[in-house]
Image (cartoon, rainbow, N blue to C red):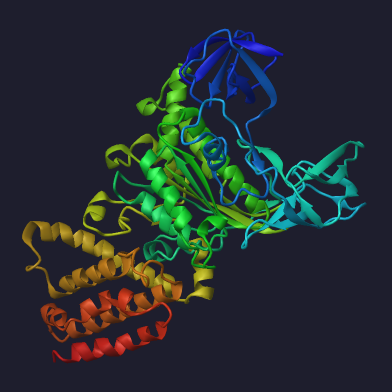
Amino acid sequence: MSEVIYGINGSVISVRHASSLAMREMVLVGEKKLLGEVIRMDAEQTMIQVYESTTGLRPGETVEGTGRPLTALLGPGILGSIYDGIQRPLNTLARAQGAFMGEGQAAAALDEAKKWQVTMKIQNGDTVQGGQIFAVCPETSQIEHRSMVPPLLAGTVSQVVPDGSYTVSDVLAVLTDRNGQNHPLRLAQTWPVRNPRPVQAREPISMPLVTGQRVIDTMFPIAKGGSSALPGGFGAGKTMLQHQIAKWCDADIILYVGCGERGNEMTQALEEFQDLTDPRTGRPLLERTVLIANTSNMPVAAREASIYTGVTIAEYYRDMGYHVALMADSTSRWAEALREISGRLEEMPAEEGYPAYLPSRIAQFYERAGYVDTLSGQKGSVTLIGAVSPQGGDFSEPVTSNTKRFVRCFWALDKSLAYARHYPAMNWTDSYSEYLDDLSRWYGEHVAHDFLDLRQEMQQILHEEASLMEVVKLIGSDVLPEDQKLTLEIARVIRVGFLQQNAFHKEDTSVPLEKQYKMLKTIDYLNSACRRLLKQHIPVSLMTKTGIFEQIISIKYDVPNSNLALLDTYPAKIDAALATIR
């Protein structure tokens, strides 16, 4: 049964007395079959948000229900794909229609003709549960795709095909539930994007997501299964930092959601991802990456859905037992889509025009992060890193402040640092991580027992420098006592030699934790050696003239990651340099 359009307000249309539709049901709107979703209903009127441009749509055209909510198609072939916000494959549509995609155009999210070499993991007569792996196939050279029984199904296997080549739509097995109803099992399955996929249990956070970026791994670490906000104004380097994390972090799968970003920036990101080489395997990084592109000139409703599409795909690979990192760039544009849709629905606005339910929507997104025991009996995680683009760099605006409530890691990017060419431009006084206590045992076992103590000491020096700089701005540094002058010099070594990192230098673009620890040890030794000279009334000016401070700053370039034993020679170099001033 179809309904009739009564009114059109931008991307929101209204239908009168739509008794055949249900809340959150996907619908096909008008002659072009535009995809939409029911978002509000009452006895008189039903409101539908359309995920495509409504230009040319007229009252009187029909609306047909599909009987299901907005879903993602999950199966082999997702990796390496580029989708829009509602999982339409952009490469497939571009080949079929050219550069400009018309309204109502659709294509299957997965290649339905491609055959996969499938190995069955179940036999006829087996009893299976939801989430159990029933077949595997090589999705890429790196990732084994593990097809699972849909989470809400359980029963006895009554038919199984032999190992061989099959498409995503072929029936590989038939499951008979306890009511005697048969359910076909295929390589592909669907899942409502707004519903979190079920898990067996949530595990405590205990393992860091190692990114190779010193300011993150050492100063403000994020855990696997954790969540982080990455706020920063225009030009602060959010996208660049996310690219670095995507390339170098130790996650198995990367999802990049370009949510409302500028078209040229999104194009550059897509091109760069396709050219990047995976440092772990030497293969293209795209083989373990999924890209979701929804630029600022695309319909806002699809932008709102893109976040949920991305996190649903992330949960799907998590359920296979993989560690997944999702980069959302940016959640501010997503929140703006919520605000625009809310305005068209004539809802009561809250702060700065955002809907009153903005905090709950942000919470729903970040709560889907986690380190879990999956239904398949394996451990997997989804780590969420959401970029925030506050207007004018104002961190007190609603999206940033509400995001801060629901994440435990806050990487505040500073535009002044970016303009000074200090990258990553992460402000060490405004940023924080609440995962340090959770990760302390891991760092003690896998790096060094005193790693976090050294980190705390360096953080303290940076905070002391921030306080001293207020004095220096007023009266200059010459009037400071020698110990405070030394604090400023050591802080400079930490800032320039440790926190600042060159993404284009082969030795500095990504740094292993062992090197990070030894760099901290070297800086700490320099600090201690200079403090001893201060007790002998030797001024800091003579210490800096030895050039040892600049040598320590250059460690990041001079010591290759493949020969960290060179770092063990630096204490002797420090002693030799400081001995020349006696």
Depth check, front residue: 208 or 29: 29
Snapshot quadrant of residue 540: bottom left
Q: Residue at x 71, y 44 (%)?
A: 188
For residue 502, above or below residue 177: below
Q: Quadrant of the N terminus?
A: top right
Place of residue 175 in the rendered image (x, y in percent of width and height, measured from the top left): 86, 44
Depth check, front residue: 564 or 170: 170
Place of residue 443 in the rendered image (x, y in percent of width and height, measured from the top left): 49, 70
Place of residue 476 in the rendered image (x, y in percent of width and height, measured from the top left): 8, 62
Tell me: 532 left or right of 542: right
Q: Residue at x 64, y 49 (%)?
A: 77
Q: Quadrant of the C terminus?
A: bottom left
Task: Let me know if residue 266 appears in the view.
Answer: yes
Snapshot quadrant of residue 151: top right
Depth check, front residue: 480 or 150: 150
Q: Residue at x 58, y 16 (%)?
A: 30
For residue 86, above or below residue 443: above
Snapshot quadrant of residue 26: top right
Task: Let me know if residue 360 appears in the view.
Answer: no
How many numbered marks have been drawn onto this rendered protein structure?
A: 0
Place of residue 159 in the rendered image (x, y in percent of width and height, measured from the top left): 90, 47
